[in-house]
Image (tube, helix red, strand yellow):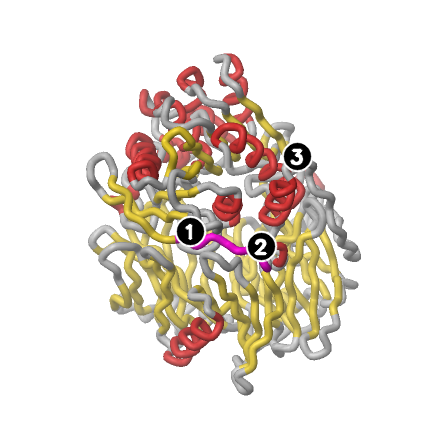
Amino acid sequence: MRVGFWSTVSAVALYISAPVSAADPSLIADAKAFGARDAAFSVDLSPSGNRLALLIPGPGKVTALRVIDLSTIAVTNAIKSDGDPDSLQWCDFATDDQLICQFGGNVLSGGDTLLGFTRLMAISADGKTIKQLGQKTHSDSALKQFDGTVLDWLPDQQGSVLMARVYVPELAATGNYNRDTREGLGIDKVDLSNLKITHVEPPRPAAANYLTDGRGNVRLMQTEDTDHEGLLTGVEHFFYRDTASRDWKPLVDYDEKSQSGVIPIAVDGTLNSAYVLKKVDGREALFTVKLDGSGTTKQVAANPKVDIDSVVRIGRGQRVIGYTYADDRRHTVYFDPEFASLHNALSQALGDPLVNFEGASADGSKLLIFASSDSDPGSFYVFDKATRHMDKVAALRPELEGRKMASVKTVSVPAADRVEIPAYLTLPPSGATRNLPAVVLPHGGPTARDEWGFDWLAQFLAARGYAVIQPNYRGSSGYGEDWEGKNGFRDWKAAISDITASAHYLVDQGIADPNRLAIVGWSYGGYAALQSAGVEPTLYKAAVAIAPVTDLSLLKSEAKAYTNQNLVSDFVGAGSNAIDGSPVRHAADIKVPVLLFHGDLDLNVAIAQSERMNAALIKAGDKAELVKFPGLDHQLDDSDARNEMLTRIGEFLDAAIGH
């Protein structure tokens, strides 16, 4: 089955969906308000600064593109996707009159293998003209899941973009002696007015990615090693090109399995350097490496407690203006003094400590800004540098405006071995602080972390009267290689012990009633909820798992359909640890009611994981329920589905631990 572009774009007609019925009126209101998808995402400012594009949610899985003229406030509802199976994922301006949008989704191929796909489209601002930007479809010899990405918006050549495009050879059986035999990832300049193609880099089967300097010059190429069966080994090579040559020369390597080596993340043409991440004392630090053949390396930033995780870029040319890291909160350090000063002024004026520069007009005179906090979901603003005037253009969650939100504070949880575990504590906005029903909410990943800020699931639980704790257990990323350790699967005992310690912390501090504790998690967090309920059968009174991993052996066998199967197998581990670390193998040890949720098009964690767990729990005589969401993936991007999920969670927890 070839994954193509499903034509579901049309004129937009949005309406409000009906709420899920429930006995408790406050639960109906809470589930609807917190379960609503973000009212604006993928927001972009046009090159002139006079137009705004944003994606908005419709009913269910519908997503629509809206274009707003900021001078007249005229609104154009351009196109929409229905999510069956393709959804609008992002849209950015190429010119004031034309955008590039990515559609994507998950589909079953061959009957039982789930595959993700994306397609890039050029779309006029009025939605009347739609053109596909990938390689022209023919009788492909292989499945083309992804047709390409935008590498460079070519600010000096408006109307064209530089694309990394995927080429798949045409079948020899077509009898066409002039058939297209190109294969791999190449680079083409695409004129959006007529789709004229200028080839910049020939397709290479081993190429995985390219980086430019933001001005159309391709400076870095990434390749990936495969074994004799075509499976990824985790070894990546990076090559550079100096300004006077077309030849590719070795720069650095990275090994995903050992997480060793250097990772380039951006190119700065003015410095003739690449920004790279490499470890210093076990934590990621930021360096520049000259691309002139000298290999001169300079350390830009390092932190003794956490990783430097990214650079900050702005404008059509994606100029690097700073870097970011997160300890108890997210921080941005700006190289550019103008942006540093502006950030501080805006943060103070808006009263929101988290201020991000999301975009800029071509001349830099207007900026797109997003500001939020722990108790504010956030809003987008357009700031005019010349007039110093700022307009609010979109709120992320208007359904929550006027509600009192919970504040989030950082706490330190003593683990069983006396190591201090960083965590976030959210208490009910009512002001109650003692002897509360409480929820432990471990994050997904496991190589991820929670951060200080607005979390709609934690806020929903707090609104229902629960104390909520979110530990960055060992196995989390961001705190260096020692903290991440072997990862939360291979060393699940350490992760679960830290999560358990956070529950005891709530009780020891007098925050939680020891008889009213529950655990809720999504993805790896769902795995942790189930595993914790089995390891600590008397600690919790209920467990909720959303899209959880439940069987580590199944996780590895499911990966056999994909080229990263060996990487998954190595990440998960083997032997008795994998057996003991699988909640489905120990369903009889779970003595509390369990509520499971899963989308049936989940590419991250197959729904079979929840189906097996539900069957095992029922066989063991436990009270369990699995709620399936047809046509949804791992994120459950459907307001109706999230509304239903939160309603059921609210009823489930109310019955188990009160509220």
Task: Where is residue 56? Give x, y as percent.
Answer: 66, 57
Q: Nearer the viewer, mark 3 or mark 2?
A: 3
- Dominant SS of magenta comes to loop
Is residue 541 depicted above or below 68 in this figure?
above
Residue 23: assigned label: 3
The outermost residue toward the bottom is 386
Question: Label 2 belongs to which residue?
Answer: 148
Kindly identify the residue that appears in the image at 54 percent across and 87 percent down: 386
**Circle 1 Cα neighbour tier, 10 Å, few/some/many (<14 / 14–19 / ≥20):** some
Classify residue 181 as left or right of residue 546. Answer: right
Q: Amino acid at mark 1?
A: Thr
What's the magenta region? 402-408
Q: Residues within 10 Å of mark 3 (few under 14, many from 20)?
A: few
Q: Quadrant of residue 109?
A: top right
Which residue matches tag 1? 223
The Cα atoms of the two marked residues, 3 and 1, are separated by 56 Å
Residue 406: say if magenta: yes
In this view, 193 is above or below 31: below
x%, y% of residue 132? 69, 57
**Which residue is pictured at 65% across the width and 72% down the height?**
95
Q: Is 479 in front, or is 27? A: 27
Residue 612, numbered label: none
- Report whether 532 appears left or right of 460: left
